[in-house]
Amino acid sequence: MSNFYAERVDWRALLGISSAVLYVIAAVPYVRAALRRSVRPNLVTWGGSTVVNATAFAAQMSAEPSWSALIAGVTACYCLLIVILTWRNGDRSLNRLDLWCLCIGAVAIVAWQLSDVAEVALFLSILADVILCIPMIEKTRRFPRSEIPSPFLIAAGAGFLSALSAAHIDAVSLSWPIWQIFVNGTIGLLALRTRTIAI
C-alpha cells in the first residue's frame, strides 16, 4: 500500500498545488482591502498582469507542461478580480507613465501573438510584465500606504514553491516563478520599508 501511494504522490505536484494555495491565501487580504477601498491598485499593472499571466500559463503549458505553470494561471484569475474591483471602485485615472508602460507592454504582447515559439512568448510575457509593473512599483515607492506588504511577500513565497515544483531546471519552467519571486518581493519589501521609515 505504501509503495502504491509513493508511486502516485508526486512531490512536484504537491509543491505546485501548495504554491497556488499560498497565492490564494495571499490574495484574500488584498481582495478584502480592495473591497474596502483601503488600497489603490494600479489599473494598468493589474490589467496587463492579467493578460501576461494568462499568456505565460498558455506558453508554458504548450511548450513544457509543469506544475510550476499553475501559479501563472491562478495569478491571472486573481489579477482579473482586482481589475474588476478597481474598475467598480472608479479608480480609472491614468498618468503619463501609465500610458507609456501600457503602450510598450501592448507591443510586447502583440509580438508574442506574432511568435510561434513558446520560449519567445514566455520571454515577451515577462518583458511585458516588467514594463507593466513599473507604475505600481513607482506608486508604492511614492505612496507606501496605497499597498499592503504582506500579500506580496506571501506571493513571493508562493513563487519560490512554484519554482521548486518545476518539472525541468530550465528557462521555460523557472523563468516565470523566479520573476514572481522578484516582483512580489520587491513591492512587498518596498511597502514594508517605506512604512517603517514613515513610522
Image (tube, grey):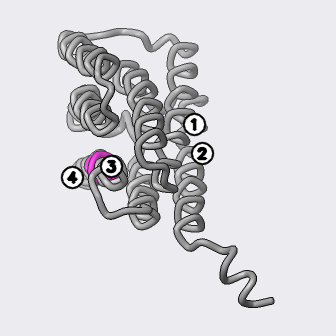
Identify residue type, mark 1. Val
Residue 89 found in image quarter: top right
The reply to whether discs 4 and 1 touch (Cβ–Cβ < 8 Å) is: no
Q: State how far apart marks 3 and 4 are (Cα).
A: 39 Å
- Tag in front: 3 or 4: 3
**Magenta stretch, overall SS:** helix
Residue corresponding to mark 1:
31
Residue 134 found in image quarter: top left
Tell me what residue is drawn at x 52 percent, y 68 percent. 12
Judge the density around disc 2: few (<14), some (14-19), many (≥20) Cα neighbours within 10 Å: few
Q: State how far apart marks 4 and 1 are (Cα).
A: 26 Å
The reply to whether discs 3 and 4 touch (Cβ–Cβ < 8 Å) is: no
Mark positioned earlier in the residue sequence (4 or 1): 1
Q: Is residue 25 above or below residue 44?
A: below
Mark positioned earlier in the residue sequence (1 or 3): 1
* Element type at mark 4: helix
Residue corresponding to mark 3:
172
Residue corresponding to mark 4:
197
Q: Looking at this rendering, what residue extends furthest in the bottom direction?
A: 2
* Element type at mark 1: helix
Q: Which residues are magenta?
A: 180-186
Taking depth in this image into account, of 140 and 157 the one nearest to the observer is 157
* Element type at mark 3: helix
Q: Position of residue 17 (x, y in %)?
A: 59, 59
The reply to whether discs 1 and 2 touch (Cβ–Cβ < 8 Å) is: yes
Identify residue type, mark 4. Ile
Tell me what residue is drawn at x 37 percent, y 23 percent. 48
58 horizontally vs 153: left or right: right
Mark positioned earlier in the residue sequence (3 or 4): 3
